[in-house]
């Protein structure tokens, strides 16, 4: 069981950084810092979009329109943190896993 929780913790951390990378990339793209016609840049942007959009889309549907500000990545990061803490403090002790 310990291996499962360690793997889930690692997956949460990796996805955390993917969300942050996606937000930073969207800013760079919006302010024309990166060249969207570059195939490498385009493939990175496409990969980040495909990895984060399924989790961000439901959040964006519920949030009110804030103009040009998108706080859905922040809400997703808070939700991931909550799930990780909940898993560590509530579920792990119930199944007898201790680090």
Image (tube, rainbow, N blue to C red):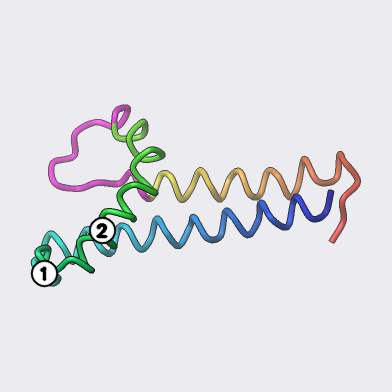
Helix, strand or loop: magenta stretch: loop
Instruction: Tell me if 35 is positioned left or right of 1 in this view.
Output: left
Give the residue drawn at x 56%, y 50%.
Answer: 81
Q: Are marks 2 and 1 in contact (CB under 8 Å)?
A: no
Instruction: Tell me if 38 is positioned left or right of 55 in this view.
Output: left
Residue extending furthest toward the right: 96
Residue ID for mark 1: 35
Q: Quadrant of the C terminus?
A: bottom right
- Residue 21, label in figure: none
Image x and y of residue 1, in percent: 84, 48
Which segment is the magenta one? 61-73
For the residue labelled by badge 1, is the local secondary structure a helix, a strand or a loop?
Answer: loop
Q: Nearer the viewer, residue 69 or 50?
A: 50
Give the residue drawn at x 52%, y 60%.
Answer: 14
Residue ID for mark 2: 45
Image x and y of residue 62, in percent: 32, 27
Verify whether residue 85 appears in magenta: no
Label 2 crowding class (10 Å Cα cut-off): few <14, some 14-19, many 20+?
Answer: some
Give the residue drawn at x 30%, y 50%.
Answer: 49
Q: Is residue 43 above or below residue 87?
A: below
Q: CA distance from mark 2 to mark 1?
A: 11 Å
Q: Quadrant of residue 35?
A: bottom left
Label 1 crowding class (10 Å Cα cut-off): few <14, some 14-19, many 20+?
Answer: few
């Amino acid at each position: 069981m310990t291996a499962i929780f360690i793997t889930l913790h690692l997956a949460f951390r990796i996805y955390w950084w993917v969300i942050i990378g996606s937000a930073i990339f969207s800013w760079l793209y919006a302010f024309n810092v990166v060249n969207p016609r570059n195939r490498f840049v385009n493939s990175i942007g496409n990969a980040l979009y495909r990895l984060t959009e399924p989790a961000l889309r439901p959040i964006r549907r519920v949030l009110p329109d804030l103009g040009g500000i998108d706080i859905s990545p922040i809400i997703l990061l808070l939700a991931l943190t909550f799930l990780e803490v909940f898993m560590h403090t509530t579920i792990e002790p119930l199944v007898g896993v201790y680090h």
